[in-house]
Image (tube, rainbow, N blue to C red):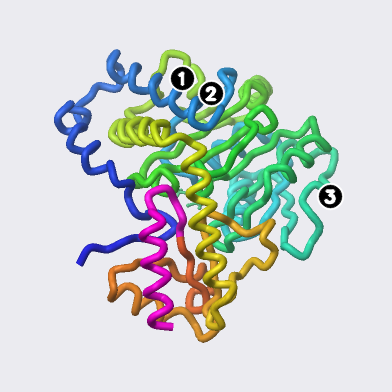
Amino acid sequence: MKKTYFTVGPSQIYRTVEDHTKQALQNDIFSLNHRSKEFQDLYQSVDSGLKKLLQIPESHSIYFLSSGTEAMERVIQNGVERVSGHIVSGSFGKRFFETARELGKDPVQLTFHEKSSQISTMEFSKDTELIAITQNDTSTGYHIPMEHVYQLAKKYPQKLIALDTVSSIPYIDIDYKKVDYVFFSIQKGFGLPAGLGVLVVSPRAIQKAKQLHSCGISIGSYHSIMQLQEFYEKFQTPETPNVFGIYVLNSIVTDYLKSGITTVRTMTDKKAHTMYTFFDTHPAFRPVIEDPVYRSKTTIVVEAIDGSSKLVHALEQRGFIVGSGYGERKGQDIRIANFPAHTLKDVKKLLSVIKEIS
Ligand SMILES: *Cc1c(COP(=O)(O)O)cnc(C)c1O
């Protein structure tokens, strides 16, 4: 039976991935030397494609890492001497905070909940160098509106702002001039296999890394921002990277550019609206986040009133793979991804099956 993956990552692969993979084999991408001109052209092509698709300014640099989790470590190491502030709305925000602790920093965490006031009213100490925000926490389904992020950034112009957008890119529309680090990995909104992280940094973030380095503070080794930047300037990477991941990312970015980012985003809105309307009006379900302002459009978390285990299993039998709740909420919630790889038709089919068996 053909399965449709509504899991939040890895997820359904985008419909063109099979063709792109064949093309990669035909073009000997698996043997491509990462110091070759072809590789530099490929890097340059993804760089300009991503900048066009996501409206990233020319002033910003785009680096390749191994994962979203790695990006958290890179951000802390290169952006914080001592104190980072973390807005935590779920397990990924918590992971970011723990990373800072494990690296020997003095992080502070502030918990965000829909009943608390918005993040721009949060207070950070004078010595907080960087504020880390999980823009879309995949564990809880919390979405932090970008307007609230900008207000916070405006209130603290001296502090660096880092955004985890792993499960909301390319849906989320960001003014990159107002933030310093944005990172994501490719197995979520780009519908690709896992194993490649992308970090976008501002000139200010590069300055901070240089400053820490000049004070004798460790900013890492081959993946320090200084090293990454040095290689980026010639469209290379310090190590042998995931060339296949970079190749298919380039192909998918080209596909998304052809559809147009507006179409990608309005389709996401439409599918999210269809799902929330269904779950809001079905007596057996309750979306975990009540306030629509904070509801994620890309990772939808819904409580199944009578428990979710049987439902998850029954859906699997019918070829629909959805996520269970995260951590302690495993048997209580279902999590459904709404990425560009998921068509409106897939979503309607999923909902009709849920209706039939609930
Ligand atoms: C999946 C995810 C991560 C981790 O990304 P990896 O590429 O698996 O390391 C981090 N943050 C959020 C919000 C995620 O959804």
User: What secondary structure is found at the residue carrying circle 2?
Assistant: strand
Tell me, for residue 122, which label it has, or none. Answer: none
Q: Residues within 10 Å of mark 1 (few under 14, many from 20)?
A: many
Q: Nearer the viewer, residue 152 or 226?
A: 152
User: What secondary structure is found at the residue carrying circle 1?
Assistant: helix
The N terminus lies in quadrant: bottom left
Q: Residue furthest bottom?
A: 306
Q: Nearer the viewer, residue 341 or 197?
A: 341
Query: Which stretch is magenta?
Result: 337-358
Provide the major secondary structure of the magenta segment.
Answer: helix
Q: Are marks 3 and 2 in contact (CB under 8 Å)?
A: no
Residue drawn at point x = 76 percent, y = 37 percent: 153
Circle 3 sits on which residue? 121
Q: Label 1, label 3: how many angstroms apart (C-alpha)? A: 37 Å
Spot occupied by residue 85 in the image (x, y as percentages of width and height): 73, 46
Dot 3 or dot 2, earlier in sequence: 2
Tell me, for residue 232, which label it has, or none. Answer: 1
Say what amino acid the circle numbered 3 marks. Answer: Thr
